[in-house]
Amino acid sequence: MDLPSLTVISDSRYDHEAIIYFGTADRLTAVRDTWLSEPNRMDPARVARFVDDCEHAISTENEAWLAKWIRDHPENTVKPRAELMECPETASVTHSRGGAH
């Protein structure tokens, strides 16, 4: 693969990440602007809702990032416990600890 092709692939990956980040920034800006426009914004319940709304926007971005990372790197994901029990590499450890036989 030539350098221009690699650059396009790299740029494409960063474009996707930029779209996610800009979307989150837009959501956070909207949450902030809504909060600032409310006369009761300093009410403790309203402040708590503002914080929850911000955390939700950020966690949505994190979930999108994590889903993409798992999709791109399945070899780095944790196997479910049932798969570990069947894995020959861990069988001796399981048996030596008194686990399932």
Image: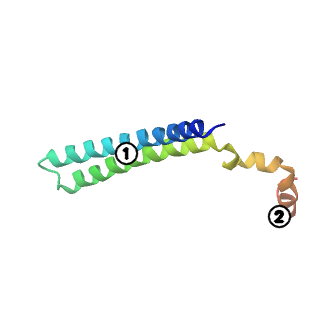
CA–CA distance in space, label 2 to label 1: 43 Å
Q: Residue at x 67, y 43 (%)?
A: 74
| Crowd class of label 2 (few under 14; some 14 to 19; many from 20; radius 10 Å) | few
Q: Nearer the viewer, residue 62 or 53?
A: 62
In the image, which disc is placed on residue 84?
none
Q: Residue type at mark 1?
A: Ala
List the single residue furthest toward the bottom.
Answer: 97
Query: Total marks drawn?
Result: 2
Residue at disc 1, secondary structure:
helix
Residue identified by numbered label 2: 97
Q: Are discs 2 and 1 less than 8 Å apart at CB?
A: no
Q: Which residue is mark 1?
A: 57
Q: Position of residue 38 (x, y in %)?
A: 14, 46
Protein image colouring: rainbow
Tell me the residue at 32%/47% (across/down): 53
Could you classify mark 1 by the number of other residues whose Cα lies within 10 Å: few (under 14), some (14-19), or many (20 or more)?
some
Which tag, 2 or 1, sits closer to the chain's start? 1
Is residue 19 shown left or right of residue 43?
Answer: right
Q: Identify which residue is drawn at 17% across, 56% down.
A: 42
Camera-near label (2 vs 1) is 1
Amino acid at dot 2? Arg
Q: Observer-nearest residue: 25 or 47?
A: 25
Q: Nearer the viewer, residue 28 or 93?
A: 28
Q: Is residue 49 left or right of residue 73?
A: left
Q: Position of residue 40 (x, y in %)?
A: 14, 50
For this view, does 52 lie left or right of residue 16? left
Q: Position of residue 100 (x, y in %)?
A: 84, 53
The location of residue 65, given as percent across then percent down, is 51, 44
In the shown orientation, is residue 96 left or right of residue 64? right
* Element on which disc 2 rests: loop
